[in-house]
Image (spheres, rainbow, N blue to C red):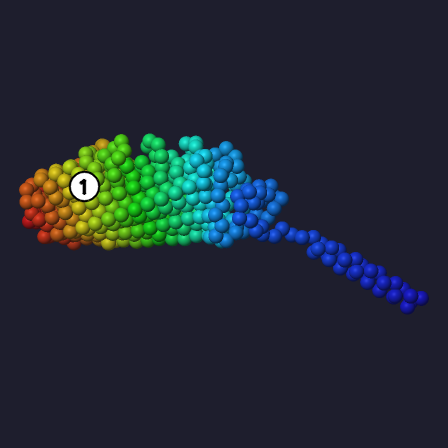
Amino acid sequence: MTRHRTTSRRLRHLTALALTTLAATATSAVPAHADVTVGCTTADLVTAINNANSGMGDPVLNLTSYCVYEVTAAASADDGLPPITLAAGITINGNNATIKRTVPANFRLFDIASGGKLSAFDLSVENGEPASNIGGGAILVQNGGTFIGDNVTVEGSTGNLGAGIRGRVGSTLTLSNSIVRDNRTTGGATTGGGIYSEGTTSLVDTDILSNRAGNAGGIGKASGTLTVTRGNIKFNTADDLGAGLDLTAGTSTVDGTVIADNRITTGGVQTGSGGGVVVVSGTHTIKNASIAGNKVAGNGIDGGGGGIHLLGEGTLTLDNTKVTANQVIGENAKGGGILANGGTLNINNGSDVTKNLLSGRYSQGGGIHAGNDFGQGVTVNVDGSAIDFNKVAGTGSFAAGVYNSDSTVTFTGASVSNNSAPADPAPGGIWTNVAITTVPGSVFANNTPTNCDRSPAPVSTCVN
């Protein structure tokens, strides 16, 4: 009897083990979703996105290598492809493929809906042109939407706000190792040839090149937070304000970036300013950067700021940043390097303003022009930095180093030297109508025709 009971227990154990193994085998036999390989047709791509959005297909889409997906009709409203709605996110591995609008019909390519998320890798998105005035020529990221791109190229697209990409209020936009180029806005006072940012935007090792707009040829930042790390903002064009970068509000940090060879063409409603950067309001820091070779062709009270124009009530801090070889061309030009009409400008830690040029009659402030033209108050602090080797050219031009009208200017361990203006009127170094008190250690030397002589108000420690 004892043997029999032991055998029964063994049988029950073996039976249970077999059933468990069978159940596990049956479970493992049920196929899991696998990455979707998308054939080289737009219909396949549309189907894959729809399936991923609905949960019927895997959200990881592998495009056919080097395929050109020609989008010839809108999938919905103003969007060439189905809007991305999946909260968990759709991933597109582009494998160097291109998604391109190829018909006269008007639509953008991607619309990331509120709550949706799209991650794209090794992909080109080209030639979007939505009919509506919402913008986002190639890519639109809605409030609550997220777009992450690595090794993505956005080019040849058109829209009134963010011809390349628009990130709306509450959106998240992240680009790394990417290029946004040759996009242009259309219509009247349009903004953001490359990118128009209203949410949280982060750019890492990303180039913004050869875009065009009414304002903000490269990047227009209207609100939220912008972080730019390394990369280039170059060869962009604007008609009015901020050919490279337009910082209207919010906060920004630009670190290790080259902002160069951007141009204001003054083809719009204003006289043009801010060849490299315009700051209107908010708090912004540019550090370890180069702002060089930017140009404004303008004149009048609003024209100037070859490198930078601090226009409104914002605060801009330059930290170890070089503002060099920028220029303004036109009569009554102002601020070859920097034009400050409002707010606070801090020039710190070797942020040298050098070799900038004003070319035109009656020009003032080859390095810096600080003028309280709009009654907003201007404060300029130069600490451990040089305003050297700047030039103003043209009859009646003066103050090749610094021009100050009704503003608060402080020099701490600064240099204003080797700046050059025509022989008459003087001075070539500093002109100010408000007394400037300098901290010992500042140097004012070798400016032509004089350092400070014939300035209406004195600059302490400045001798001729």
* Residue at image point 24% right, 54% down: 350
Q: Residue furthest right?
A: 1
- The picture places residue 12, in percent across and down from the top left corner, at 84, 60
**Badge 1: how crowded within 10 Å, few (<14), some, or many (20+)?**
many
Q: Residue furthest front?
A: 103
> Is residue 394 shown left or right of residue 48?
left
- Badge 1 marks a residue whose secondary structure is strand
- The picture places residue 120, in percent across and down from the top left corner, at 48, 49
Q: Quadrant of residue 244?
A: top left
* Residue at image point 14% right, 47% down: 391
Q: Residue furthest bottom?
A: 3
- The picture places residue 133, in percent across and down from the top left corner, at 41, 32
- The picture places residue 371, in percent across and down from the top left corner, at 19, 37
The answer to whether residue 155 is seen in the rendering is yes
Image quadrant holding the N terminus, namely bottom right
The answer to whether residue 411 is seen in the rendering is no
* Residue at image point 32% right, 45% down: 210
> Is residue 231 shown left or right of residue 54?
left
> Is residue 77 shown left or right of residue 236?
right
Task: Identify the amino acid type marked 1.
Answer: Ile
Q: Is residue 189 above or below residue 209?
A: above
User: On the image, numbered disc 1 is attached to which residue?
Assistant: 329
* Residue at image point 7% right, 41% down: 425
Q: 339 or 236: which is nearer to us?
A: 236
Q: 127 or 372: which is nearer to us?
A: 127
Q: 184 or 384: which is nearer to us?
A: 184
